[in-house]
Amino acid sequence: MLIAANFKTFKTRQETLDYYRDVRTFIEKNKITVESMIFPPATALNTFKGATVVGAQNAYAVENGAFTGEIGLNQLKEFGIKTILIGHSERRHILGESQELMVQKFDFFKEQGFTIVYCIGEPLEVREEGSETLMAYLDEQLEGIDLNYENLVIAYEPVWAIGTGLTPSTDEVELIHTALRQKIKAPILYGGSVKVNNAQELLSLNNVDGALIGSGALQAENFCRILEIAEGLQK
Ligand code: PGA
């Protein structure tokens, strides 16, 4: 099982260091074996020593170059970062990144052997059209992505569940993960309003291999509690 925290545009470098230290202490003290990852903002990337993997929320598909406001492979290499989030709905919908760009990033970082947490998820209007439309939408987001890549992790995150406190029913989550499992052997995380109080039921579902968590994991203490829940369910 894998528990990942996405800090988005929260936390400074110092706050990230404090968070990492608290999580590391907890993991060591409680002998947690569940895999964990955090995605701090680019300004807080650092060389971290501990079991929790640190990844980038985003990077441009380039070693370096003239891409104002972006970071590339060399800026990640400085800190030994080998994990990246690609396709998060906030990048697709707020920053307007296309599927074509996702594929470009995916191929570049795959070539570099990165662990790629690739996010997919449908907006509410798609969900309301029923499961066939929903699965077709998810398929489009998987277009051009090598699903057999050995360092791939998928995160299924319904857009309308992100940061809203809403989640699909557990039956719905299980159904979608099970449908995805037919074509994806990689671990499939669920994301979208995962919190300490619903982690147990979501993580217990068939074909849910972990969680990608935003607001519910912003406090190190909550991330640790979710790690503890996952440890109890370790499958
Ligand atoms: P949330 O965000 O847990 O705040 O809903 C999840 C995500 O965006 O990865």
Image (spheres, grey):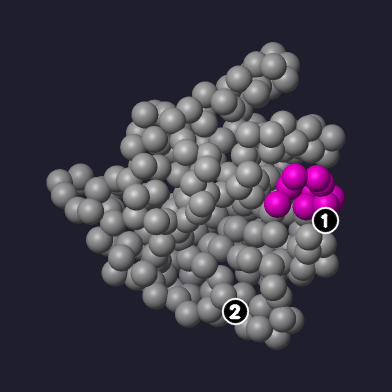
**Please, is residue 14 above or below residue 126 in the view?**
below
Can residue 95 be seen? no
Q: CA distance from mark 2 to mark 1?
A: 22 Å
Question: Is label 2 within 8 A of ligand 1 (CB to nearest ligand atom)?
Answer: no
Q: Secondary structure at mark 2?
A: helix
Tell me what residue is drawn at x 30 percent, y 65 percent. 77
Instruction: Judge left or right: residue 2 versus residue 207.
Output: left
Q: Quadrant of residue 75?
A: bottom left
Q: Which residue is mark 1?
A: 200
- In reply to whether residue 206 is colored magenta, the answer given is yes
In this view, the residue in front, 107 or 42, is 107
> Which residues make up the magenta segment?
200-209
Name the side, left or right, on which 226 lies relative to 152: right
Helix, strand or loop under label 1: helix
> CB of mark 2 within 8 Å of CB of mark 1?
no
Q: Amino acid at mark 1?
A: Gln
Which residue is drawn at the image coordinates 36% and 69% (left, top)?
Answer: 80
* Residue identified by numbered label 2: 24
In the image shown, does 148 or 162 lie closer to the viewer? 148
Most extreme residue toward the left is 66
Assign the magenta stretch its main secondary structure. Answer: loop
Q: Against 142, is 210 above or below?
A: below
Residue 151: x and y in percent read 50, 54
Judge the density around disc 2: few (<14), some (14-19), many (≥20) Cα neighbours within 10 Å: some
Q: Amino acid at mark 2?
A: Arg
Task: Pick the residue in front: 137 or 16.
Answer: 137
